Every structure is written in structure tokens, then in C-alpha cells.
Amino acid sequence: MIFNAFLENIAPYNAGRPVDEVVRDFGVLPEDIIRLASNENPYGCSQKVIESIKKYAKNISLYPDDSMGKLKELLAKTYGLSAQNFIIGAGSDQIIEFCLRIKCNASSRVLMAKTTFAMYEIYAKQTGAKIIKTSGKLHDLKEFEESYKEHGADVIFLCLPNNPLGECLDFVEVYEFLTSIDHKTLVVLDGAYQEYAAFKDKNKSIDCKKLVLDFSNVIVLKTFSKAYGLGGLRIGYGIAQDDLIAKLHKIRPPFNVGSLSLEAAYWALKDEEFIQKSVEDNFTFMRDYEDFAHSHQMDFIPSYANFITLFCDNKTLNSTEICEKLLQKGVLVRDLVSYGLNALRITIGTKEQNLKVFSLLQANLS
Ligand SMILES: *Cc1c(COP(=O)(O)O)cnc(C)c1O
């Protein structure tokens, strides 16, 4: 059979080893598995969410409200915008896909950082677009500007903070950069970890309202999968001017987000205390990882997200081997070998989970 030729260049996303397999292959009890490979919230989600889902369960025979008005109104209030400035997706992943589909075809170009979220490239390639990457290790707006001048781009992705390295550009620099971009180019600002970054340093906080007021070609993406702890419910959203949102809605399938997800997201957004506590603990325990890295001569980049990436080069260690050793003990972390890096990306866990990581790492570093 002959398939779409675009598929030839696409390496499927690697979502890591399924927990069931780890249980089966290494005899680890399911309750002893420590999941620090996907940047999920180690504290779960708000209790308000759990209660709302229980109450809502009796309605699941009904299709969701496709207008998603209840959640959009709350988002509008939260951001000081209106409901027409929001599109809700099955994870912000789905909005990434929509953004590429409204802009790209086989003659398009998509610009992104060398090491960034893998789905930008995968969805871009599905449209046949050509990928252009900056060459520096981290996001560098000078490089983005030069590359944009040289090659042009239909879509530009900035990941703020960046997964998988954790660095984050200042909002003022990003704003300045946006003023240099033609309004024909769509700029996607992926804020999947914004709750963390904004807490650590106000300068990293994306001012969504200002962007919506000033730019017709910019969209900010947010997700409920990370700080809000709703990864299993697949819900995220995009914030932009209403014309851009209306274009995205043209390719959104009906009922793309389930009713339980919409209900859960509504209550998750209302529980600010839960987010505050999760984010605070994240940076408290991140310091333990930084101390560990220092005392073991492992390099890292200061992270503005809920993970830290530790480089293994210094001691001629091999990240794949270390990952495998941790996996055998039921601890899942992300090997960055597929990004061409000899590094581990570890989600900051609970205090107990982190201690387990340190003791296993210690045993494998010596
Ligand atoms: C996790 C993540 C997303 C998307 O997550 P969803 O679960 O699809 O909402 C988007 N961007 C980055 C950088 C991420 O790390």
C-alpha cells in the first residue's frame, strides 16, 4: 500500500515505558512505582476536582456542551478577556496540531529551537512543512530573528519554559521579539509550565491579556496536565484574538473534549491554593536536586518548570544505562538520548520520591 509520503520523516513520539510493563518485567509492586518521567503533578490534583467528578458521573451518558461556555467564562474572568479569546483542546497538544493545520502545507516552514518539545516537529511534519531549528543549545531570540530573516517562517514556536531543558526567556524579550515578526507569521508561545515559571520569577510570566490586545498573530497555550494534575483527562487551551480563535475552531472536531474533563478543569482552575502549594514544594525540592548535582559534578540548567535535566557527560556516565537501572527499581525518569543528549530529565517528585531517586542515582554514579 502507498501512504502519505510525509509519514516517512516522522519518528513517533516516545511516551516512555508503560507502568504495567515495569510491574511485570521487574516485579515492582504497582504502588511502589515512582513516575517522574512525564512532568505530572506528584501530589495528584485538587480535592475539589475529585468531588466534582464524582458528582458529575451520573451525566456521562450525555455529550459534552460543545460551546464549553462554563469553562470559557471562568477562563475569561481569570485572564480579563472574553470567551471568544479561548479554544479548548484535548490537551494543549491538540491546539498545537490545530495551529499547524491552519497555517501549513508542504511549502511551509516552521521555526523552533534545536532542543524543544517533540510534538511541534511531529505535527508540523504531518502537514508536510519544512522544519527549521536554531542551532544553540537553549532558546536564543537573536538566533530566531536571524533565522527568520534568512528563511522566513509560517509558524514559530517558543516554549516558555522549555521542555526538556527548563530554561525560560523573559517576557519583555519575547514581547520585543514579537514586534519584529510579520503579522502573517503565527507565533505559538507554549506556556505548559507557566504556573511554575511565574512563581519562580515574575519576569518569566507571560502577560496573555497584553499579547491578545497587541498581536493578531500570537497564541499562548496552557494545559491542565502539569501543575493542575489532570494529565489523564486531556485538556488544555489556547488564548488569542477572536479572529485567530475562530480560524482554529474551523478544524476543531465537535465534542473534542469530554464532559468530565471540562468539569474537572473548571474546578481545578478555582483551586488556587492547590496550585500554590504544588508550585512552592516543587522549587523547595528542586533545590535538593541542584545540591545533588553540585555534589556529584553533574551539570544542569537552572529550571523554571517542574523538572530538572541532569547531564551525565562529566563522569562518562550513560543516561540510557542509568535510566534502565532506575527503571528496574520502579523509578521512571526520561532519558534524553532521543534529543541527542546524554542527560536525564527528572520530574521533581514528593520528598520521599526524591530521596529514593537520590539513593538510586548515588548507587549508579559511583
Ligand atoms: C506536556 C506539554 C504539553 C502538552 O500537554 P497536554 O497534556 O497535551 O496538554 C505541551 N507543551 C509542552 C512543552 C509540554 O511539556
Image: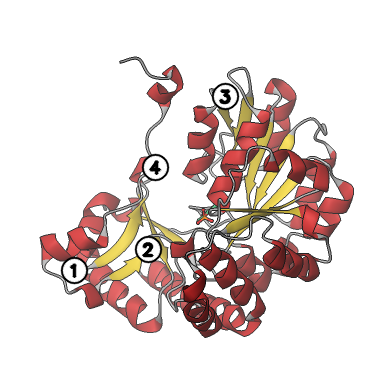
Q: How many labels does the image show?
A: 4
- Quarter the N terminus occupies: top left
- Amino acid type, label 3: Ala
Q: How far apart are marks 2 and 3 (CA)?
A: 41 Å
Q: Which residue does the numbered mark 4 point to in the structure image?
A: 13
Q: Distance between the residues labelled 2 and 1?
A: 24 Å
Is disc 4 surrounded by few (<14), some (14 to 19) or many (20+) residues within 10 Å?
few
Residue, x 21% and y 62% (percent of image)? 20
Q: Which residue does the numbered mark 3 point to in the structure image?
A: 129
Q: Which residue does the numbered mark 2 point to in the structure image?
A: 297
Instruction: Answer with mark 2 or mark 3, whichever residue precedes in sequence.
Output: 3
Instruction: Answer with mark 2 or mark 4, whichever residue precedes in sequence.
Output: 4
Mark in the foreground, 2 or 1: 1
Residue, x 26% and y 75% (percent of image)? 359
Q: How far apart are marks 2 and 4 (CA)?
A: 31 Å
- Quarter the C terminus occupies: bottom left
Q: Which is more toward the observer, 288 or 36?
A: 36
Dot 3: element: loop
- Amino acid type, label 2: Gln
Q: Image height check: is 240 above or below 47?
A: above
Dot 2: element: loop
Q: Residue furthest top?
A: 2
Mark in the foreground, 1 or 4: 4
Residue, x 64% and y 39% (percent of image)? 99
Q: Do the residues labelled 1 and 3 touch (CB within 8 Å)?
A: no
